Image: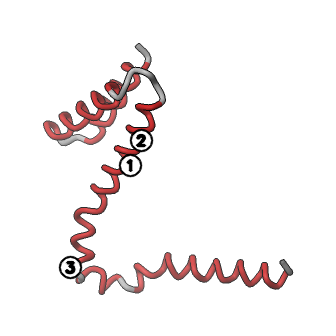
């Protein structure tokens, strides 16, 4: 690859990256009024977090021979505490603490 091709590739990557990062600011007025974007804004974050949770639980459950019980118990505790108290820090700390205790006993 020549120096000119490398520089052109770097410049193109920079322009594309800048454009993609700036697009939400340019299209903000359209994005705020579009019903599909509003619907995605309500459901997509929860969907992504659920998929990440399931993927990490599956990977962690395969890493030890005891089965998925520590993961399931920790997630259940986190969900119950969040549902009951609606305090994310408490829920996450309690769920993480239970997970660490179950894995180390």
Q: 10 Å neighbourhood of mark 2: few (<14), some, or many (≥20)?
A: few
Rendered view: 68 above or below 18: above
Mark 2 and 3 residues: CB-CB less than 8 Å, in contact?
no
Q: Residue 62's spot in the image, x, y percent?
A: 45, 31
User: Residue 6 got which mark?
Assistant: none
What residue is shown with label 2? 56
Q: In which quarter of the image is the C terminus?
A: top left
Residue at 30% of width from left, 86% of height from top? 30
Rendered view: 48 above or below 38: above
Disc on the earlier residue, 3 or 1: 3
Mark 1 and 2 residues: CB-CB less than 8 Å, in contact?
yes
Rendered view: 66 above or below 57: above
Which element is circle 2 on?
helix
Which element is circle 1 on?
helix
Q: Residue 63's spot in the image, x, y percent?
A: 48, 29
Q: How far apart are marks 1 and 2 (CA)?
A: 6 Å
Residue at 30% of width from left, 85% of height from top? 29
Nearest the camera: 74 or 14? 74
Residue at 71% of width from left, 80% of height from top? 9
Q: Residue 88's spot in the image, x, y percent?
A: 27, 42
What residue is shown with label 3? 35
What residue is shown with label 1? 52
Q: Distance between the residues labelled 3 and 1?
A: 26 Å
Mark 2 vs mark 3: in front: 2
Residue found at the very far top of the displayed protein? 105
Q: How is the image coloured?
A: secondary structure
Residue at 40% of width from left, 79% of height from top? 24
């Amino acid at each position: 690859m020549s120096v000119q091709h490398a520089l052109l590739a770097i410049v193109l990557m920079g322009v594309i990256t800048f454009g993609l990062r700036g697009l939400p600011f340019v299209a903000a007025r359209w994005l705020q009024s579009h019903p599909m974007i509003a619907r995605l804004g309500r459901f997509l974050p929860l969907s992504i977090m659920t998929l990440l949770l399931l993927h990490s639980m599956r990977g962690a459950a395969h890493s030890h021979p005891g089965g998925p019980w520590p993961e399931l118990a920790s997630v259940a505790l986190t969900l119950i505490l969040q549902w009951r108290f609606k305090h994310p820090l408490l829920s996450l700390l309690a769920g993480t603490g239970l997970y660490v205790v179950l894995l180390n006993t």
